[in-house]
Image (cartoon, helix red, strand yellow):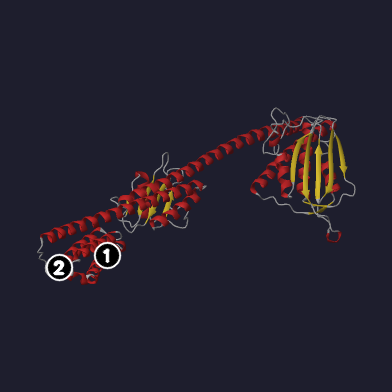
C-alpha cells in the first residue's frame, strides 16, 4: 500500500471521529433544554451543525453525523427522555422529518462542496495548461522546452521526469537531451524503445512490461515523434488526473516536435548551404588552378623540348614564375579564410611606421601596378601605429589587387593614410565600374563576385580583408564614388605612441 493511500485512510478515520465528537459535544451543551418545551429548537441547532460539517467533510462522516444527531435528539430530548420511545404522533413525524432532512441536507451540501472543489480543480488545471502553453511558446530550442517541461511536471505532478529523444533517424538515444549525465539501464532502454516504436505507454502501472519501476510514455507528434518521457509514479493516474496528464504531455510533445522539426530544417539548410559552397569552391578552384597549371605545363614543356634562345627561355621562366605566384596567392587565400573560419586569427600588435607597410606592399605588387598610376598620400607627421604588420600587409595587398582587376589600364589608384582621434584611416579608391547598388552589401561575403565580371579569383580577397581588419578591432566599408569608381575605407583604433615604451619592431 502506498503512503498516499495510508494518508487518505487516516484522514477519513479522523473525519469520522471529529464529526462524532462535534455532535456529542453539541448534545451535551444543549442538554439543559431537554426538560423544557423548547426541545424542538435542539433539532434546528443540530441540523445547522450537520450543514456546517457537510461543508468540509466527506459524505460518510456527514451521514454518520446526521444519523447520530437524530438518535441523540430522540434519546435525550424527545419525551419520554432516556428512551427511544416517542409518545406523541407529532413528535414521531418531526423525528422522521428531522432524520430525512438531516440526511438529505448533509448529502446535498457535500455534493455541492465536491462539485465546487471539482470546478476549482478544473480551473486550476486549465490555468496550469495555459501557463504551460505560454511558457512553451516562449521557449526557444529543445533544451529550453525540456527545462520548462521538467519544471512544470515536477510542480504539478510532484515527480521528476526524464526525456529521451530520437537522433533524427528514428533511433532513440540512450541518454537524455537535457540530463546528459543520466543513462538508461539496458532493461529501461528496451522498454523505452518499445514505447517509441509502438506509441503505447509501458512500465510500472501498465499492462506492457510492468517489471520496471519507471513508467514510460510516448511523445506523439503530428509528423514525427520526438521520443519518450520516463517518470516514477507513486500511484497510477486515474480519471481526471489521467486526462490532465495526457493533455499536459500533448502540449509538451507538440512544442518538442516544433523545435525538433526546426532543428531538422536548419540541418537541411546547413547541408544545402555546405553543398552549394562546396560546388562554388570546387568550380572556382578548378577554374583558377587550370590557368596557372596550364601555363606552367606549357612553358615547362617548351623549355624541355626545344632549343629556344636565351631570351625566349627567360620569358618562359618568367611565365612560370608569374603562374606560380598566382597559385601561391590562391593557396594563401584558402589558408587565410580557413584560419578566419576556425577563429584562429588574432592580431599581434606592435608599433610600425606606416610608410614601411606601404613600401612593402608596393614592392610586392610592382608588376601588377605597372599599367596603373599608384598615387600615395600619407598625412604629414603621421605617427607610428600599433598594428599586426603581416595582417595589414595582406589587407592592403588584397584591396590593391582588387583595384588592378577592375580599374581600366592607365587609370589612377589612390591610396591615402591618415590619423585622427586615435584612429588610423586608410582609403583605397579606383576608377573602376564600381559595384551594382543591389550587390554592394554583399561585397565582403565569401565567394562573392559581381555577376558578369571576367576577372579571376575566388571572391575571397575582400572577405579576408574584412576579417583581418576586424581582428584589429576596426571596420571596413565600401561605397561607389559619384564620379565613378569604388572607395574602400578602413578605420582601425590605435593609441598615440609613447616614445619611451616603443621597441624596435620585429619584421620576421
Circle 1 or circle 2, nearest the eye: 2
Q: Name the residue under label 1.
A: 15
Q: Where is residue 312 in the image (x, y as percent from the top left)?
A: 82, 30
Q: Position of residue 171 (x, y in %)?
A: 42, 45
On the picture, is 246 further left or further right than 434?
A: left
- Dot 2 falls on a residue whose secondary structure is helix
Q: Mark 2 points at which residue?
A: 75
On the picture, is 2 further left or further right than 443?
A: left
Which residue is at the far right?
380
On the picture, is 282 further left or further right than 229?
A: right
Relative vertical location of residue 143 with respect to residue 413 in this rendering, above or below: below
Q: Residues within 10 Å of mark 2 (few under 14, many from 20)?
A: some
On the picture, is 139 further left or further right than 204?
A: right
Label of residue 411 in the image = none
Dividing the picture into quadrants, the one containing residue 465 is top right
Q: Position of residue 343 (x, y in %)?
A: 65, 49
* Badge 1 or badge 2: first in the primary sequence: 1
Amino acid at each position: 500500500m502506498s503512503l498516499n493511500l495510508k494518508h487518505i485512510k487516516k484522514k477519513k478515520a479522523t473525519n469520522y471521529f471529529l464529526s462524532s465528537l462535534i455532535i456529542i459535544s453539541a448534545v451535551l451543551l444543549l442538554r439543559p433544554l431537554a426538560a423544557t418545551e423548547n426541545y424542538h429548537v435542539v433539532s434546528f441547532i443540530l441540523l445547522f451543525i450537520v450543514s456546517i460539517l457537510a461543508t468540509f467533510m466527506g459524505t460518510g462522516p456527514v451521514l454518520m453525523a446526521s444519523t447520530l444527531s437524530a438518535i441523540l435528539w430522540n434519546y435525550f430530548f424527545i419525551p419520554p427522555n432516556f428512551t427511544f420511545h416517542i409518545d406523541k404522533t407529532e413528535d414521531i413525524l418531526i423525528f422522521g422529518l428531522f432524520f430525512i432532512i438531516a440526511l438529505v441536507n448533509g448529502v446535498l451540501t457535500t455534493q455541492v462542496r465536491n462539485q465546487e472543489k471539482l470546478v476549482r480543480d478544473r480551473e486550476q488545471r486549465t490555468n496550469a495548461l495555459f501557463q504551460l502553453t505560454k511558457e512553451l511558446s516562449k521557449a526557444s530550442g529543445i533544451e529550453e522546452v525540456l527545462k520548462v517541461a521538467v519544471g512544470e511536471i515536477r510542480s504539478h505532478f510532484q515527480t521528476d521526469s526524464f526525456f529521451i529523444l530520437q537522433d533524427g533517424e528514428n533511433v532513440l538515444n540512450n541518454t537524455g537531451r537535457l540530463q546528459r549525465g543520466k543513462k538508461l539501464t539496458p532493461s529501461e532502454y528496451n522498454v523505452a524503445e518499445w514505447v517509441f516504436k509502438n506509441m503505447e505507454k509501458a512500465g510500472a502501472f501498465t499492462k506492457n512490461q510492468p517489471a520496471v519501476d519507471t513508467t514510460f510514455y510516448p511523445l506523439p507528434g503530428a509528423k514525427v515523434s520526438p521520443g519518450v518521457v520516463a517518470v516514477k509514479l507513486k500511484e497510477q493516474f486515474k480519471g481526471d488526473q489521467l486526462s490532465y496528464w495526457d493533455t499536459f504531455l500533448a502540449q509538451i510533445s507538440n512544442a518538442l516536435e516544433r523545435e525538433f522539426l526546426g532543428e531538422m530544417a536548419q540541418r537541411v539548410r546547413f547541408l544545402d548551404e555546405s553543398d552549394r559552397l562546396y560546388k562554388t569552391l570546387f568550380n572556382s578552384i578548378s577554374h583558377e588552378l587550370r590557368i596557372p597549371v596550364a601555363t606552367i605545363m606549357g612553358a615547362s614543356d617548351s623549355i624541355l623540348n626545344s632549343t629556344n634562345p636565351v631570351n625566349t627561355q627567360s620569358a618562359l621562366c618568367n611565365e612560370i614564375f608569374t603562374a606560380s605566384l598566382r597559385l601561391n596567392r590562391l593557396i594563401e587565400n584558402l589558408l587565410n579564410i580557413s584560419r578566419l573560419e576556425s577563429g584562429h586569427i588574432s592580431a599581434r600588435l606592435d608599433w610600425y611606421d606606416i610608410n614601411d607597410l606601404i613600401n612593402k606592399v608596393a614592392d610586392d605588387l610592382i608588376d601588377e601596378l605597372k599599367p596603373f598610376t599608384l598615387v600615395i598620400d600619407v598625412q604629414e607627421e603621421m605617427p607610428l601605429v600599433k598594428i599586426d604588420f603581416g595582417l595589414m600587409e595582406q589587407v592592403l595587398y588584397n584591396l590593391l589587387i582588387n583595384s588592378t582587376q577592375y580599374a581600366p589600364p592607365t587609370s589612377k589608384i589612390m591610396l591615402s593614410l591618415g590619423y585622427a582621434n586615435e584612429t588610423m584611416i586608410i582609403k583605397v579608391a579606383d576608377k573602376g565600374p564600381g559595384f551594382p547598388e543591389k550587390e554592394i552589401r554583399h561585397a565582403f561575403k565569401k565567394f562573392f563576385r559581381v555577376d558578369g565580371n571576367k576577372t579571376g579569383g575566388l571572391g575571397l580577397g575582400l572577405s579576408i580583408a574584412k576579417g583581418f581588419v576586424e581582428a584589429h578591432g576596426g571596420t571596413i566599408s565600401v561605397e561607389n564614388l559619384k564620379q565613378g569608381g569604388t572607395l574602400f575605407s578602413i578605420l582601425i583604433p590605435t593609441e598615440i605612441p609613447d616614445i619611451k615604451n616603443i621597441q624596435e619592431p620585429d619584421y620576421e
